[in-house]
Image (spheres, rainbow, N blue to C red):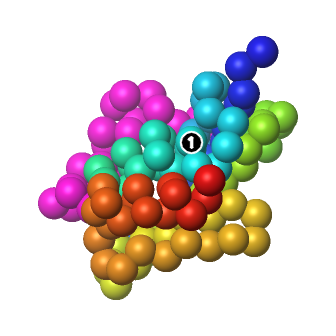
């Protein structure tokens, strides 16, 4: 049986304030989710010229799921990312552990956080 993860993406900006949800299989630790799924989203947000570009891309690719499905999913790992676009603050969290990035996250900073989680 594949391991299931649930990731909540919370975004604050002048244009958008809300959250959406991602569910998937194949990653059973917070480090795995950050290394693969969350890192991808953090970097996409950081590299988007406007947050709407990122949000439309997520919707267009059908990556997100509804809150009801997210709540009903019996996941092995639940984590979240929080992005405050206006203040360029990025964080990854699992349980009561929060890992904040200094400004826009880089691949090396994300890798360092993955190592801390392992």
| Residue 73 at x, y percent in the picture | 79, 34
Residue at the spot 75% in from the left edge and 71% down from the top edge = 96
Q: Is 48 one of the magenta-colored residues?
A: yes
Residue at the spot 58% in from the left edge and 49% down from the top edge = 31
Residue at the spot 36% in from the left edge and 80% down from the top edge = 102
State whether residue 15 is above or below residue 23: below
Please state the extent of the stretch shown in magenta in the rendering.
45-67
| Residue 98 at x, y percent in the picture | 62, 73
Residue 54 vs residue 1, the one in the foreground: 1
Residue 23 vs residue 1, the one in the foreground: 1
Say left or right for 60 vs 1.
left
Toward the bottom, the furthest residue is 87
Residue 75 vs residue 110, the one in the foreground: 110
| Residue 88 at x, y percent in the picture | 33, 78
Toward the top, the furthest residue is 1
Residue linked to disc 1:
32
Q: In which quarter of the image is the N terminus?
A: top right
Q: Could you say whether the residue bearing mark 1 is in a helix, strand or loop? A: helix
Residue at the spot 55% in from the left edge and 72% down from the top edge = 99
| Residue 76 at x, y percent in the picture | 78, 38
Query: Is residue 61 at least partly visible in the picture?
Result: yes
State whether residue 57 is above or below residue 113: above
Say left or right for 68 vs 7.
right
Name the chief secondary structure element in magenta: helix
Query: Is residue 81 at least partly visible in the picture?
Result: no
Could you say which quadrant of the image residue 49 lies in?
bottom left
């Amino acid at each position: 049986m594949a391991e299931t993860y649930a990731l909540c993406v919370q975004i604050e900006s002048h244009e958008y304030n809300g959250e959406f949800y991602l569910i998937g299989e194949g990653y059973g630790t917070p480090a795995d989710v950050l290394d693969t799924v969350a890192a991808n989203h953090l970097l996409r947000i950081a590299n988007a010229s406007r947050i709407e570009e990122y949000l439309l891309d997520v919707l267009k690719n059908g990556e997100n799921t509804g809150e009801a499905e997210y709540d009903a999913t019996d996941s092995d790992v639940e984590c979240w990312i929080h992005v405050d676009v206006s203040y360029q603050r990025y964080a990854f969290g699992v349980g009561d552990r929060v890992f904040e990035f200094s400004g826009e996250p880089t691949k090396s900073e994300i890798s360092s956080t993955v190592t801390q989680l392992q």
